[in-house]
Amino acid sequence: MRFTKKDILDIHSLDPEEISFILDTAMGMKEISQRPVKKVPTLRGKTIVLFFQEPSTRTKLSFEIAAKRLSADSVAIAKAGSSMAKGETLIDTVKNLESMRPDVIVMRHSSSGAAVQVARRVDCSVINAGDGIHAHPSQALLDMMSVRENKGRIKGLKLAMIGDIANSRVARSNIIGFSKMGARVSVCAPQTMIPAGIAALGCTVAPTMEACVADADVIMMLRIQKERQDDVLFPSEREYAGRFGLNKARLALAKKDVTVMHPGPMNRGVEIASDVADADCSMILDQVTNGVALRMALYYLVAGGSRHADTD
Amino acid sequence: MQILIKGARVLDPGSMDEKKDVLIDGEQIAAILDPSDALPSDSVPSGAMPEHTGDMQVIDAAGLVLVPGLMDIHVHLREPGHEYKETIASGLAAAAKGGFTAVCAMPNTMPVNDNAQVTTFILEKARLAKGAKVYPVGAVSKGSAGSNLAEIQDMQQAGIKAVTDDGLPVVNAQLMRRALEYCNGLSIPVFVHAEELSLVNSGAMNEGPAATFWGIKGIPNAAETVMVARDILLSQLTGAHVHFCHISCKESIAAIRSAKQQGIRVTCETAPHYFTLIDEDVKDYDTNFKMNPPLRSNEDREAVIQGLADGTIDAIASDHAPHSKEEKDLEFDQAAFGIVGLETSLPLSLQLVHGGALTLEELIRKMAKNPAQILGINNDIIPGNRADLTLIDLNQKTIIDPALFVSKSRNTPFAGMVVQGRAVCTMVDGKIVFNALTD
């Protein structure tokens, strides 16, 4: 297939064939990271700007390593060091970046929609590395890649997702992505964390954590965001862990071969018990490994792959 | 100077709906004549009516509707202080182009219109402008800061017709009670910006599936209705006239309907965007769809139309909120709330008439008669009244094009929409301030 998208902004705008194609491409990329010399010349001469305006360790590093493994030149700028700290608007900053002729801008921003707004104003490719509480497509794609690799399929699986759905871009992208690929998605959280009309994205809301994880093939725990405590979403971490934490007893309600995922960073002892996080069924570190391959695939498809086949 | 408007359908809700000639002499309506009538002998020479006789101007208004001057009781003119968004002159010209002969200027300028000096400044600027009249609205509290009452009587003597802290709610219920009691004695209404800020919680669009899809924090209907309910009770307690601004949702309308049935002195307005658009129309983070209160669900939109039809909603006001490109071309959650409305309000509202939701007479009540009544102004089309009149072409189709706005700002979600009907001539105190008839 020919991949024609200029940008990767959210999961909603990708159709199932495109998602499968991205996952296939990522599987091919995975082998590169296992070589002694972990570098191929595929994107030599391409420039990638990593424009992160929110703190990020794993996602930023993952995008950076992915660029290097494909021989692209990557440059990172952060909000603190950028002219946005001096009052320049997002659009002006990005138009300036564009003037330096990058091939791809990878951006993370605290406002939902920022990447969408930027993408329609620049000619280069934009990859959304997380915008507000809207979307985190590379995370959802690497999660789908990990599940497909582990289970051999996505269609027909039951995915249980527990945590702050309302304030999570990972949750939105995964609900849309997994349901699009044929999984049944069940979510659970205190009602303070369930946004109005979430079912329309393609999930059901389980009444209890036990009902949510029952017979699940995959359990995805979301991070409880301590910085949102001022919004009175739950009384205490202690009470939250008691009602919605994933422990061995709740894990036992799921399928025997259940897989546990977490996009990180984890709060051990809050949303996930330590012994579950470290159990054999935990795929948390595999997700991180796959993240590099998936992001290599995204770069390849928007900047060097079939979209540019005619000119290469 | 005399003006004769010939052959229009003269529609003054409640008193007249027939083909008449209207003679204007100076600043006043001089006579309303049957089309066949000869003019009073001291007005024109006897015999056939020439196009111009002396200094009489004749407007051929056949096929048009002449109505009492439309009034938009919720407009942000931005001057003093934010002249880059709008000036009194540009705003009043936009109003005239939209068919409005008068607007209420909200007090959230810089400085706030919380004293007679600012009120006087606004009226003086308006007097020099060629456009609609302005009825200033003063602040409830000093600086609209919500702690002490502004000098309301002083402002009333300078010319305000109502008070509000619009843009912000009066958070303190006791201050609201005192404001209502105080204004009741002055016989002026308190305009309420109904918003419980703690429930808004930095939301930027209507709470619901669309906000969830886009990842925009939601504003629930209750953020509006909680305050509507509070101020209905305070109106009941004090007997004062409360007017609710920009009502957007079904629960508020139900509360106001019930209050009216109990005889509580409340009135309310809605804006054209609340009966034209819904939250699902917010697409791709276009900040021209961001306003406060936000575009609601389709159910709310239908409730707004129902509220207009059954009389619960008294008035249509645009909440004209001009903002510069710089304030709108931002991330959705950081962009300013508000859209311009003066030049789109009448055409959008006429769609209700074309669609059968309202009769033309009902619409003119909501855009001319009721707004005047809320402010205590008589704008009947009768001899002796000031000649504030609007001529409407019900059929002319136009495409809304922000590039043609005379407002200084362009922040509208309606660009490209095809609408039917518009104002073609606006007359204030007997002077033509907008005329598209000669185009």
Image (cartoon, coloured by chain):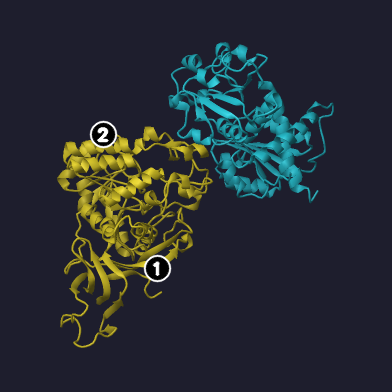
Chain colours: A cyan, B yellow
Name the residue nearer the viewer: B13 or B124: B13
Residue A233's x, y, as percent?
Answer: 45, 24
Q: Does residue B141 appear in the picture of this structure?
A: no
Tell me the number on the disc at residue B396: 1
Q: Earlier in the sequence, mark 1 or mark 2?
A: 2
How many numbered marks does the figure carry? 2
> Which corner quadrant of the image does residue A174 belong to?
top right
Q: Quadrant of the C terminus of chain B?
A: bottom left
Name the residue nearer the viewer: B333 or B105: B333
Q: Residue at 38% of width from left, 33% of height from top?
A: B199
Callout 2 secondary element: helix
Q: Which residue is the site of mark 2?
A: B173
Callout 1 secondary element: strand
Left/right placement of residue A240 relative to residue A297 reads: left
Query: Vertical placement of A162 versus B8: above or below?
Result: above
Query: Vertical placement of B423 versus B414: above or below?
Result: below
Query: Vertical placement of B37 versus A228: above or below?
Result: below
Q: In which chain is the residue bearing label 2?
A: B
Query: Vertical placement of B322 versus A290: above or below?
Result: below
Q: CA distance from mark 1 to mark 2?
A: 48 Å
Looking at the rendered structure, the kind of residue marked 2 is: Ala
Looking at the rendered structure, the kind of residue marked 1 is: Gln
